[in-house]
Structures are given as C-alpha cells and as structure tokens.
Amino acid sequence: MPAPKVADDYYAGAEKVVVHVTMEGDEKKYLGVLGNVSNYIKALDQTGKKTDAIIVMNGDGLGLLTTAKQVEMNADAKLPAKIAELKEKGVKFQVCYNTLTGRKIKFEDLYDAKAEDVIPSGVAEAGRLQSQGYQLLKP
C-alpha cells in the first residue's frame, strides 16, 4: 500500500511537542512511547519541518531511563539504542528533581543522563512548555 499523501498544512503548528511520561513500564512499553516520538518526527520530516521535541519524565516515568540503564548490557536490549537515536535527532530528555530526591533515585542509575537534563519539577515543566506553544502528547 502506498504511503498517504500529507497536506502541507497537516502538521501546522505541531513542530514543538512535549511528551509527558509518568507511567510505569518495562522495556517494551517504553519502546512504544519512544516509537511514537520517532514516528512523529518522521511524519514532520515528510513536510520538511523539524521537530523540537522534549520528553519530560516524572514519577514512575523515570523508569524509562532506569530501565534503559538496567538493560544496557544485554545484547538484545533496544531501549538504550532508541534513546541514543532520538537524542541524535535532537530530542531532549528531562528528569524531575522532585522524583529523584523523593524516591531516592541515584543519578547514576539513569541511562545517559546529564546534570543539565534535571529540571525542578516535571509537572511544572510540562505546563511551562505548553504555555510556550508546545503541544502536549501523553502516552
């Protein structure tokens, strides 16, 4: 089946997106979330538009990075590679400081996280980004 034709204005205003990840999951579930982000970027690429995508994680959503860290040494693990692929495309991954401290999660237990990825509050950041024109995607 041929791919559908995409109208030029189909994705108008959709270049900025925040994906708010708060759910618990396993590698398969988190791969599904990241697959949606990847598909979103591909769809916009078809129109010549670039995406400014930010994944904000808080609460159980930090499992995305702790799970990736836990499985990174497994030969068949796909989650770390998918995170790296999206980062290569410019997707930012932001981590909630309140969740880190409240749940006593060690920073080194997060896959490929850097100090600049930590934000004060995931919920507040998702709201702030929406006020700046980001569209909210909730997996």
Image (spheres, grey):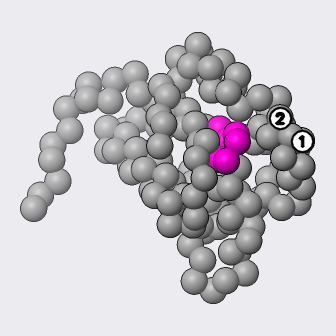
Residue 62 in the image: state x and y as whole percent: 70, 49
Crowd band around label 2 with a 10 angstrom C-alpha radius: few (<14), some (14–19), many (20+):
some
Can you name the residue that lies furthest to the top here? 131
At a point 58% along the width and 13% down the height, the residue shown is: 131
- Look at the picture and state if 67 lies above or below 10: below
Q: In this rendering, would 127 be left or right of 9?
A: right
Q: In this rendering, would 25 be left or right of 112?
A: left
Viewport quadrant of the N terminus? bottom left
At a point 70% along the width and 74% down the height, the residue shown is: 72
> Label 1 belongs to which residue?
101
Can you name the residue that lies furthest to the bottom here? 75
Q: In this rendering, would 68 be left or right of 10?
A: right
Q: Can residue 98 be seen in this view?
A: yes
Q: Which amino acid does label 1 sit on?
A: Thr
Q: Of residues 59 and 89, which is closer to you in this image?
A: 59
At a point 62% along the width and 20% down the height, the residue shown is: 127
Crowd band around label 1 with a 10 angstrom C-alpha radius: few (<14), some (14–19), many (20+):
few
Q: Which element is circle 2 on?
A: helix
Residue 129 in the image: state x and y as whole percent: 62, 22
- Magenta includes 39? no
Q: Which element is circle 1 on?
A: helix
Span of residues in magenta:
56-61
At a point 59% along the width and 42% down the height, the residue shown is: 21
> Label 2 belongs to which residue?
98
- Look at the picture and state if 109 lies above or below 61: below
- Look at the picture and state if 127 lies above or below 70: above
Residue 35 in the image: state x and y as whole percent: 45, 56
Where residue 97 sits, quadrant-wise, is top right
Asked whether disc 2 touches disc 1, contact meaning CB atoms under 8 Å apart, the reply is yes
